[in-house]
Amino acid sequence: MRRSAPSAGRLYVPLIVSAFAWLALAIPAAAASPTATPAASAPSATAGALGVTVVGSVDSSAYPSISASLSIVDAATGRPETALDASNVSLSPTAQVTTVKASTGSIPGAYVLAIDTSGSMADTAADGQTYMAHARTLAKAFAAGVGPDDLVKLVTFDETTVEKTSWLKRNDPNLGKAVDAVDYEARQTFVSAGLLAATKIANARPAGFDRRAVVVITDASPADNDTNLSSTTMRQALGPSTFVVGLLPPAKVGSTLSQLLSDVATYTGGSYQSADTTKDPATLFGPVWAITKSTWNVTFNTDPAPSGKTLDEKLTIHDAQGAAGTTTVTYQTGGLFGKSQINVAGLANGASVTRDQTVTISTAGYTAWKGGYQVQLFFDCDPRPQASKCSPNLTANTATLTWPITVATMTQGKHHAYVRLAVTYEGVQYFSPTTTIDFTRSGTTWNIAAVILVGGVSVLLIGAFFIASRRRGSRSKQRSAQ
């Protein structure tokens, strides 16, 4: 597996420091609290490595076609891969990709839920409720829609960013209580500082939660358009997908702030929507919830092995930006011989054979064995015992073997025919289950060769008798004439 790219922080620390050094002077000192997080820039999220993991069990029911669901995310940002096809997947050592398609699965994610608590959140919306009341309602709706294994951390932001909870699951009562306790304060909103702090918190998620996102609920007041928020700054500093829900009507937000929030959402693969247009949680948060459900299904064909052992295939994923990641798909090789049928025509099991006849043995079902296969016929010698010294009487390296039965060469009584497939894989020979045909050589009917022989001998004897009779008659006539 390729190593991850160098720490994003090493690449962009000089840039971030120069862009935000003066920001610390403009932001009041955070209140003394063990949960207060001063606004600070997050490490830059430079793509370079993909986190690729197998989701659920590998499907080998159609072996040698193998199907696996993969979680593919940018390791630096936690953003899921959104565009992939067969050209982005390479395999080793032997398999060939057949299909790559988007799918869904259950993958745990970590969400930072950030609520604006500035003084403007006390303003009243058109329905008579405060924007803060709307924010609490939407926050609960978001938390209710995440997956059962997802984690949510509630934070608030105005002039500082405060972590209100630890990482909690949706049904944890402490999460609901913390949302109910959120209220506005007579402070300004430093949107840039809040977004950057939320990014830092999301990147510090618990181990095993590679997928992460930031959800921001704010009134998006034009007064919050601090000069620190710029597309360039956000592009350099933001990482996880950021989804912004604005509570004010778009006309009141203003074009400048709307454009900046849209730029943030677009760059991070998130969204910026107005809750004034719709308050439907599925519309506002559906894209967020979908992050932990998006997977990629990769199907590949591998060289068939009849042994039933466990094999590995290494998958390497490359995205359009040059990032790469690997994972190993482990699968079982069994079941192929069960899909290869042996059909016998011209001789039924338990039959009584009284004349010459032709038996046709053909294969069907799965026959695409690497290097081919051989049909083997054994007559009156069972090859199945481990100590068996039987050698096949007839073989065919094609799908059909023809066996001409000549009864004259068989003794009266019971006989047995055994048929199987032989496949060589990596220098080892494997055999399919053996098909057994029991039959009896019986009756007094002569075979064709015997009839011809007896008939010929009879003709010779009759001819000899006729010639001898004529000679005796000639001799009698000669004696009479004398």
Image (cartoon, grey):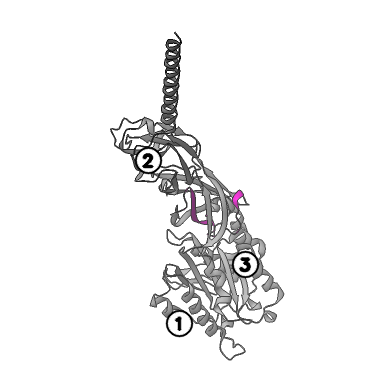
- Based on the picture, tell me whether residue 459 belongs to the magenta stretch: no
Residue plotted at (43% across, 29% down): 449
Mark 1 neighbour class, 10 Å CA radius: few under 14, some 14 to 19, many 20 or more: some
**Which image quadrant for residue 266?**
bottom right
SS at mark 1 in the image? helix
Verify CB contact (< 8 Å) between mark 2 and mark 3.
no
Q: Of discs 1 and 3, which sits in the foreground?
A: 3
Which of the two discs, 1 and 2, labels the residue nearer the N terminus? 1
Q: Which amino acid does label 2 sit on?
A: Val
Q: Position of residue 121 (x, y in %)?
A: 57, 82
For the C terminus, the image quarter is top left
Q: Position of residue 173 (x, y in %)?
A: 39, 78
SS at mark 2 in the image? strand
Q: Name the residue under label 1.
A: 180
Q: Cα distance, mark 1 to mark 2?
A: 90 Å
Mark 3 neighbour class, 10 Å CA radius: few under 14, some 14 to 19, many 20 or more: many
Residue plotted at (62% across, 89% down): 126
